[in-house]
Amino acid sequence: QVQLVESGGGLVQPGGSLRLSCATSGFTFSMCAMNWYRQAPGKERELVATITSAGGSTNYADSVKGRFTISRDNAKNTVYLQMNSLKPEDTAVYYCNAVRIMSGVDYWGQGTQVTVSS
């Protein structure tokens, strides 16, 4: 049974930091590229950050570049998103996504709410 479980969301003041985690099971994590998406109310889902299967390459949306860092631990089947210098416009539900390299089949977590507000 495939599972992706996000955690670490919450309420934070502008300028603060949060670290999201996505613990996975039920598939071969090391054979998947991993992504973090977010969706704000009334907006389309947006790709925030990507990391390759071995972690050798990352990519970020322009809106978060220099503030967010994606990383992974293949021994723990977990991907992380370190978010610094948070802004109110970062408020959204953040979703973890796994994409199998060979087939393109993907899996989604249930999301975790991040709210940036004073």
Image: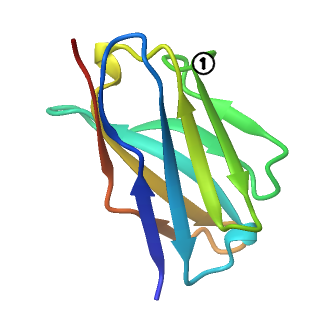
Residue at x-position 68% and y-position 78%: 28
Q: In this rendered view, identify the residue nearer to me: 65 or 22.
A: 22
Q: Residues within 10 Å of mark 1 (few under 14, many from 20)?
A: few
Q: Is residue 8 positioned above or below 12 on the image?
A: below
Q: Where is mark 1, residue-wise?
A: 65
Tag 1: amino acid: Lys
- Locate the C terminus by quadrant: top left
Q: In this rendered view, identify the residue nearer to me: 20 or 108.
A: 20
How many numbered dots are placed on residues in this image? 1
Camera sees residue 104: yes
Residue at x-position 52% and y-position 20%: 84
Camera sees residue 45: no
Q: Quadrant of residue 59?
A: top right
In the figure, is residue 7 to the left or right of 77? left
Residue at x-position 48% and y-position 81%: 2
In the figure, is residue 30 to the left or right of 45? right
Q: Is residue 19 positioned above or below 100 on the image?
A: above
Residue at x-position 47% and y-position 24%: 17
Q: What colouring style does the render use?
A: rainbow
Q: Position of residue 33 (x, y in %)?
A: 67, 57
Q: Is residue 66 positioned above or below 61 on the image?
A: above
Q: Position of residue 55 (x, y in %)?
A: 79, 49
Q: In this rendered view, identify the residue nearer to me: 2 or 104.
A: 2
Q: Position of residue 51 (x, y in %)?
A: 69, 46
Q: Residue furthest left?
A: 42
Q: Position of residue 7 (x, y in %)?
A: 41, 53
Dot 1: element: loop
In the figure, is residue 42 to the left or right of 20? left
